[in-house]
Each structure stands twice: as structure tokens, then as C-alpha cells.
Amino acid sequence: MAFHVPEKYRHRSGFLRSDASYGNNGAFFIPSRPGQPPLKIIASDEGGWDHVSVSLPNRCPTWDEMCKVVALFWDEGDCVMQLHPPRSEWISNHPYCLHLWRPTAEAIPLPPGWMVGYKELGEIAAGSPQLRAAAARKYDELTLLRGDGKAPQ
């Protein structure tokens, strides 16, 4: 498990420029959708945290874009998180920026799978809108069928 940066996307000139000697720290411009501006990323691995901030000029990154960033900066087996800290701890320097974090000294605890969803529905994240809608209907059906208020086992 490791944090790593995609060197081919490193920003090498102008403000926030860096090179490979900066290690996992620097700015990166990751291609987004065709005709759209790149995802602007600032990465660091200091202070006991692996961290990337991901921004766009006119909207927040989507779930799929954040998944792309996770795949580029971390290994498949790494657990990475977005945080919602207490309101008193909020810091917002950009209206369309999201952050991904992984502590380096300890594992992130995960809830049991049954609290997230139903494994029998399979992975639908990359599916078509029709597949996603069908899975949502099946999820609702499974949830309503239980009807006893108990968590699935």
C-alpha cells in the first residue's frame, strides 16, 4: 500500500511548479472529460497524512472523478477518505475543492459491509444509467422486504 504521484501530470512551470525531487508533493493537472478543464490537484505526504485536494474552476469534482484521482495516487488496496469535520473546523479556500486523506500511521476503520449496502447487488458504479436505476430499484425492494427494522446479516 502506497501513496504515489502520477509524474506525467506534474505541473512543472509557473506557480506551484515542482519536479520529481519533490517526491509526493506538488501540483498536478489531470485530464477530465473531453472539452473540460483538467482536475487541479495539490498533493502532499507530510505531517502524518497522505493528502490531495482536487478542484475545478466552476463545479465540484464528481464521484467518478474522485475515484479516478484515488486510482492515480493510491494503490487499489488503500483505504482513502473524505472528511466532514465539525463546522468549527471547516476551512474553505476554494468553492469547488474536495479533499482525500489517508493517515500514514494507522489504518482507517471501516464499517461492516451490511451497513453500506447489499453485496448481492454487485458493483454498479461503472454501469449505465439503466443499470444504476435497476440496482436502485432492487435495493429499495430488498430494504422494503425486510420490513422489520433490523440490519441485514
Image (tube, helix red, strand yellow):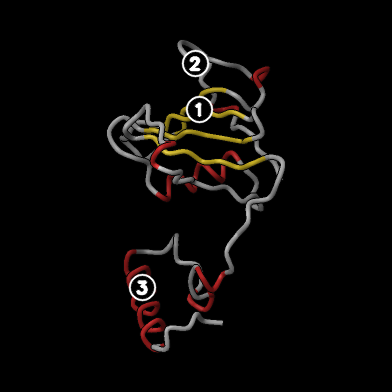
Residue indicated by mark 3: 136
Q: Disc 2, disc 1: CB below 8 Å?
A: yes
Of 33 and 125, the residue lying toward us = 125
User: What percent of the width, then of the height, locates residue 122?
Assistant: 51, 72
Q: CA distance from mark 2 to mark 3?
A: 43 Å
Instruction: Tell whether 153 sits left or right of 133.
Output: right
The picture quadrant where one finds residue 95 is top left
Of 35 and 99, the residue lying toward us = 99
Q: CA distance from mark 3 to mark 1?
A: 35 Å
Tell me the element at label 3. Answer: helix
Instruction: Tell whether 31 sits left or right of 95.
Output: right
Question: Pointer 3: residues within 10 angstroms few (<14), some, or many (20+)?
Answer: some
Tell me the element at label 2. Answer: loop
Label 3 is placed on what type of residue?
Ala
Label 2 is placed on what type of residue?
Leu
Q: Residue at x 31, y 29 (%)?
A: 57
Residue indicated by mark 1: 42
Q: CA distance from mark 2 to mark 1?
A: 9 Å
Q: Pick the quarter of the image with the C terminus.
A: bottom right
User: What percent of the width, then of the height, locates residue 78?
Assistant: 64, 49
Question: Pointer 1: residues within 10 angstroms few (<14), some, or many (20+)?
Answer: many
Tell me the element at label 1. Answer: strand
Label 1 is placed on what type of residue?
Ile
The picture quadrant where one finds residue 114 is bottom right
Instruction: Tell whether 104 sits left or right of 99.
Output: right
Q: Earlier in the sequence, mark 2 or mark 1?
A: 2
Residue indicated by mark 2: 16
Question: Pointer 2: residues within 10 angstroms few (<14), some, or many (20+)?
Answer: few
The picture quadrant where one finds residue 131 is bottom left
